[in-house]
Amino acid sequence: MQNTRIALVQMEALINGREQNLAKLKKYIEIAAVNKAHIICFPETSIHGYSKNLYEKSAEPLNGVSRILGEWANKYSICILAGLAEKAHNKKPYITHLVVQPDTETGIYRKTHLGKSEKPYFSEGNSLPVFKTPTATIGIQICWDLHFPEISTIMSLKGAEIIFAPHASPTIVGDRKSIWLKYLTARAYDNAVFLAACNLIGENGDGQSFCGGALVIDPKGKLIAYDFSSKEGILFADLDPELINRIRKKDTKSMRDSFYLQSRRPELYKELLHQLSAEKE
């Protein structure tokens, strides 16, 4: 990993407000570019706004959005992570996050774990990709995904150095900072990754409100940047690669710098799969 400046956005995204939402994305991309960020991450469904029962109408194929974001990525020399409702052929829509880099094929992550209230309206993704950027290898998990530790482990084993966690967490679930620090620190610490989360904020125009929040945790579980001001905005964080590069070196002599995943014993974990099979029967 190299020195990486990231930008995390908490923003209001309106249902049926695609053009307005995209205009807001562009504004923040311009700010991030001026501040020399390498990667900017927007919240879950930042392009379409978050709503379960309207997505059959508002979901769209990826081509149009990918083209627009691709133009901005090239113009501003930045990697853009942005979320939308993706139209799926003969299926319910996906909750999708795009990885758009200059002169590079668009990367796609589709939310793999849906909450109970989402399952009637969306399709689940079925892959856990990681994406190489010029300064770091990254993974994406969307909101509910972060409650499943195995995903972070798989992404770290695949080489992810930063895991971005875009959310659409409503106000009703409570204070994001105290809740996130219960489990996102563990995802970062156990897997030796930076963890960067951001959330929708404000109203969606369909009766839902979101509590916002953005934070960054280092590979030792230390909170290094945050913004819980309850206002739209952009949070910058400079990620120093020295710590993660030291941890990831296979010849490290210090227990303090252990990459715990190198000591895993997968042969002991087969019961996880057996339990899953039994639950499905």
Image (cartoon, rainbow, N blue to C red):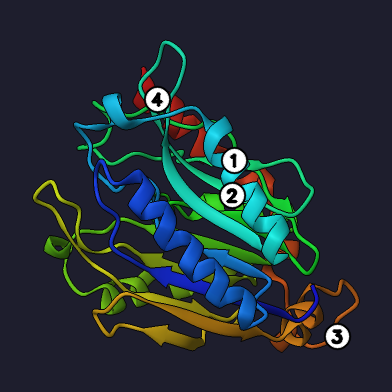
Identify residue for label 2. Answer: 69
Identify residue for label 1. Answer: 66
Residue lying at the far left in this picture: please name it.
207
Instruction: Say few, some or many: other residues with alpha carbon within 10 Å of mark 2 (under 14 / 14 to 19 / 20 or more).
Output: many
Instruction: Say few, some or many: other residues with alpha carbon within 10 Å of mark 4 (under 14 / 14 to 19 / 20 or more).
Output: few
Give the spatial CA distance, label 1 vs label 4. 40 Å
**First in sequence: mark 1 or mark 3?**
1
Dividing the picture into quadrants, the one containing residue 34 is bottom right
Whether residue 265 is visible here, answered yes or no, is yes
**First in sequence: mark 2 or mark 3?**
2
Identify residue for label 3. Answer: 253
Residue lying at the far top in this picture: please name it.
90
Give the spatial CA distance, label 4 vs label 3. 42 Å
Amino acid type, label 4 = Ala
Residue in the picture at 40% in, 48% down: 47
Quarter of the figure that contains the C terminus: top left
State the SS at label 2: helix
Give the spatial CA distance, label 1 vs label 3. 45 Å
Residue 67, given in percent of the width and then of the height, sits at 62, 40
- 102 up-or-down from 84: above or below: below
